[in-house]
Each structure stands twice: as C-alpha cells, then as structure tokens.
C-alpha cells in the first residue's frame, strides 16, 4: 500500500506510551485491512526497538485475525461448508501465510491411491480396510496421544507434513477422504473420542425420526484405523459411565467438527503470554455456534 501522510503519522504513534493512543492507532491501522501489512512488515524490519516490534507484530496479528473472522463467517454461513477448507482456515490462525496448494496435493494423493483400490463390489468393511491400509500403512500417517501441549498436532497441514496426528486431526483427514470418494462414513459424537461411523448407503440423514445407531455398520478409530463393533462401543460407554444417548451416533456437521477442533486448539494456549490467542479462538467458537442450528 502506498504510504500516505495519515499512515506515516499512525506509524510514528505506534510507540506512544499512552495505551489509549496505541489502541486508537491499532484500530485505525486495522481499518486499512490486509493491504497495510507489507508496510507494517517493512516498518518492523527497519525498527531496532524490540518493544515497538512486538506492537507491530500484534497489529499484524489483529489484521490477520480480522480477515480470518470474515473468512470463517463466510464459510460457516455457506450452503455446504467444505470440511477441508474449514480446517485450513483454522490453521491460518497460527499460520496466516499458509500455502494451501501443497495440502490439496497431499489430500489428492491419498484420495487417488484409495480410489485405485476401491470398486463398487466392496462391502463397507472392505472399503474401511482399503482406507486404513492406504492412510496408515501406505501413506504412513501415525496416531499420537491426544494432548494439548502442541497446537501443531491439530493443524492439518502440519499433520500431513509430519505424518503424525492426534485422533482429532486424523479423524478429519479420514472423513475428508471418505467424502471425496462418496464413502458413507462420518465423525460421530462418542464422548472423549474421535470415532468414524460407517453408515448404510441408503441412510436418509434428513429424516427427523431416524435412529442413527441402527444405520451404523461399524466404527473406525481414526488414530490407527482399527475397526470396532457396536458391542465395543457399548462396552466403552459403560466404562466411562455414559448412557448410550442417541445423539452420540449422529454425524457431526462440518460446522460442529470445526468448532470442536478450535476448542481443542484453544486448550493449547495456557500461558499468560498466549491468553489473547485463547480468547480469540473462543471468539471463533462463538462465531460458529451462532450459526449452528
């Protein structure tokens, strides 16, 4: 963006010790939108003062976050929010300059390899075996313990890059591949788990009276691709003291999946210095919840 007298004046006020002045300057700069970021980056590079650099970094972060809020609002209100695109938007919270082309290429590589092994004569269990074989054996995606000490474990591009992901990230990747291949499988809401349910091919998800549990063939643990029976899930629910509530077997909407993903990422920012990130992520959660029927 071409620098103007107003921009130059705002830049000179970034180091003002008065917090009211700094807040006003920040709001004015955020009002310029993303085009002002290169100017701020140049200012950062030519400013030796670390305190001023930190302020510039915060302003740039605010600009990226405002842009992300707008993109996520558009995504969540779209008629058919794409799960992969939603997950990549979430990754842009931490990696605003994320290049999505390599991620799309990785996903397409997995999809194509699974597609080559599928045919219309396979049973759902045989389909699941092909998916698990390609994703976990051929592609070597590994499941790691679900912890909240590293947000990269939840960002899809980082998981695909390292080929290591927790149950939350792996389940999203699994569902994305299933959707691209018209395999009738989806993440369901089993407590404290990220489980994929394989549904009957003729399941009518628009039927308000549907009993989702009766429509499920079996379940897959997205951490490692292991298949589970209904008895396995019932045993697990008894062990954790949960009744087999019908809502546990209902497929999560893409909005709900992304909301839950953001909630998990927010738990990674526990330090006082990261409190603003946790607060911003919870703002994104509220944004999505306001749109979920």
Image (spheres, rainbow, N blue to C red):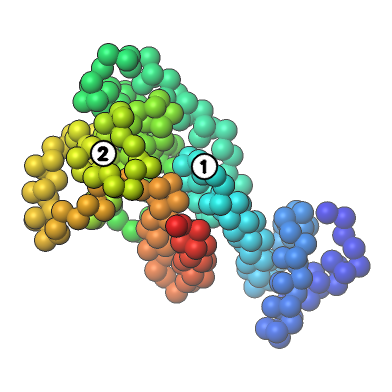
Image coordinates for residue 23, horizontal then vertical, percent: 69, 78
Residue 258 visible in this rendered orientation of the protein: no
Query: Which quarter of the image is occupied by the N terminus?
Result: bottom right
Image coordinates for residue 275, horizontal then vertical, percent: 47, 71
Q: Separation of disc 2 and disc 1 at Cα?
A: 21 Å
Whether 118 is drawn above or below 10: the answer is above
Outermost residue toward the right? 5
Decide which of tag 2 and tag 1 comes sooner along the chain.
1
How dense is the environment of label 1, judged by Cα within 10 Å: few (below 14), some, or many (20 and up)?
A: few
Tell me the SS state at disc 1: loop
Front: mark 2 or 1:
1
- The residue indicated by pointer 2 is 197
Image coordinates for residue 108, horizontal then vertical, percent: 47, 26
Taking the spot 8% from the left edge, 49% from the top edge, the residue there is 235
Taking the spot 27% from the left edge, 23% from the top edge, the residue there is 127
- Quadrant in which residue 19 is drawn: bottom right
How dense is the environment of label 2, judged by Cα within 10 Å: few (below 14), some, or many (20 and up)?
A: many
Taking the spot 30% from the left edge, 28% from the top edge, the residue there is 201
- Left or right: 38 as drawn, with respect to 9: left
Query: Which quarter of the image is occupied by the C terminus?
Result: bottom left
- The residue indicated by pointer 1 is 80
Whether 142 is drawn above or below 246: the answer is above
- Quadrant in which residue 262 is drawn: bottom left
Nearer-the-camera pick, 222 or 210: 210
Tell me the SS state at disc 2: strand
Residues at marks 2 and 1 touching, judged by CB atoms closer than 8 Å: no
Whether 138 is drawn above or below 36: the answer is above
- Left or right: 139 as drawn, with respect to 239: right
Residue 179 visible in this rendered orientation of the protein: yes
Image coordinates for residue 202, horizontal then vertical, percent: 31, 30
- Left or right: 79 as drawn, with respect to 116: right
């Amino acid at each position: 963006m071409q620098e103007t007298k107003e921009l130059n004046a705002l830049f000179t006020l970034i180091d003002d010790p008065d917090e009211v002045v700094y807040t006003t300057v920040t709001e004015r700069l955020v009002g310029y939108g993303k085009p002002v970021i290169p100017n701020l980056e140049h200012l950062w590079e030519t400013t030796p003062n670390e305190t001023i650099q930190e302020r510039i970094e915060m302003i740039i972060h605010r600009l990226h976050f405002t842009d992300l809020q707008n993109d996520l609002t558009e995504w969540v209100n779209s008629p058919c929010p794409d799960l992969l695109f939603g997950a990549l938007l979430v990754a842009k919270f931490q990696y605003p300059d994320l290049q999505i082309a390599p991620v799309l290429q990785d996903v397409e590589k997995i999809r194509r390899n699974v597609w080559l092994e599928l045919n219309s004569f396979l049973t759902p269990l045989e389909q699941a075996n092909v998916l698990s074989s390609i994703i976990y054996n051929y592609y070597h995606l590994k499941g790691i313990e679900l912890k909240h000490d590293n947000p990269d474990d939840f960002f899809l591009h980082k998981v695909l890059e390292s080929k290591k992901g927790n149950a939350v990230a792996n389940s999203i990747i699994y569902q994305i591949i299933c959707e691209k291949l018209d395999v009738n499988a989806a993440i369901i809401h089993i407590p404290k788990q990220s489980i994929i349910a394989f549904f009957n091919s003729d399941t009518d998800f628009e039927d308000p009276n549907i009993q989702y549990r009766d429509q499920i063939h079996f379940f897959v643990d997205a951490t490692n691709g292991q298949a589970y029976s209904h008895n396995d899930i019932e045993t697990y629910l008894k062990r954790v003291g949960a009744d087999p509530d019908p809502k546990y077997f209902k497929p999560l909407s893409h909005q709900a999946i992304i909301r839950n993903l953001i909630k998990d990422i927010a738990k990674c920012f526990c330090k006082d210095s990261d409190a603003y990130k946790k607060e911003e992520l919870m703002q994104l959660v509220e944004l999505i919840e306001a749109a979920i029927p």
